[in-house]
Image (tube, rainbow, N blue to C red):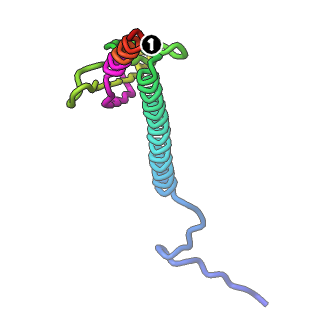
Amino acid sequence: MIVIRRSPKPGRGRRTGMTLLEVFIALAIFIGALAVITQIVSTGSRAAVQAQLQTDAVLRAETVMAEAVAGVIALQSASGQAFSDDPDWTWSLTVAEGSHIDTLQLTVVVNHANSTGRINAQATLTRLLRDPQVFLDAAGESSTTSGLELLQ
């Protein structure tokens, strides 16, 4: 038995490989996709760091406010105070007359500066507080009044 092979007609031959153009197009698509994925990961990483800094700023502002309300920090305005655990974090306290009688408005601003000095996280917290001096004055009056009653 004799097998005769016919040669394919011109223009209808079967291709057995990829052309150089197809390889370059596939490589360009791969590199483009890799660049997009790298950018997405980078953006996500920056957002995570920023969220962590913002969370730290809020927690530090709450801490300073709680210390001011508790009397650990004097109720007077202070600016640019560094935290003892990290000098990149600073806080400022503003004490002003409140909107109501015998109240104070406390405003705490916490900033985080990066190595170039640019602020990259900030939190502001405001609270109305009864003026503690009113209580001290009332306590002083009641002690002098009770002392006078004992003398009579």
Figure check: 48 above or below 23? above
Magenta segment boundaries in residue numbering: 118-139
Is 136 left, or right, of 102 in this rendering? Answer: right
Residue located at (46% from left, 73% from top): 11
Q: Position of residue 78 (x, y in %)?
A: 34, 12
> 138 or 86: which is nearer to us?
138
x, y percent for residue 148: 37, 11
Viewer can see residue 88? no
Residue situated in front as seen by the camera: 114 or 131: 131
Q: Quarter of the image holding residue 134? A: top left
Q: Is residue 61 above or below residue 89?
A: below
Quadrant of the frame with the C terminus? top left
Seen at 21% across and 28% down, the residue is 101
- Residue 108 at x, y percent in the picture: 35, 24
Amino acid type of the residue tagged 1 in the rendering? Ala
Q: Position of residue 126 (x, y in %)?
A: 32, 30
Give residue 149's quadrant in the image.
Answer: top left
Mark 1: secondary structure:
strand
Is residue 122 highlighted in magenta?
yes
Q: Is residue 111 visible?
A: yes
Q: Residue furthest bottom?
A: 1
* Residue at far front of view: 152
Q: Which residue is mark 1?
A: 82
Residue 97 part of the magenta-drawn span: no
Quadrant housing residue 114:
top left
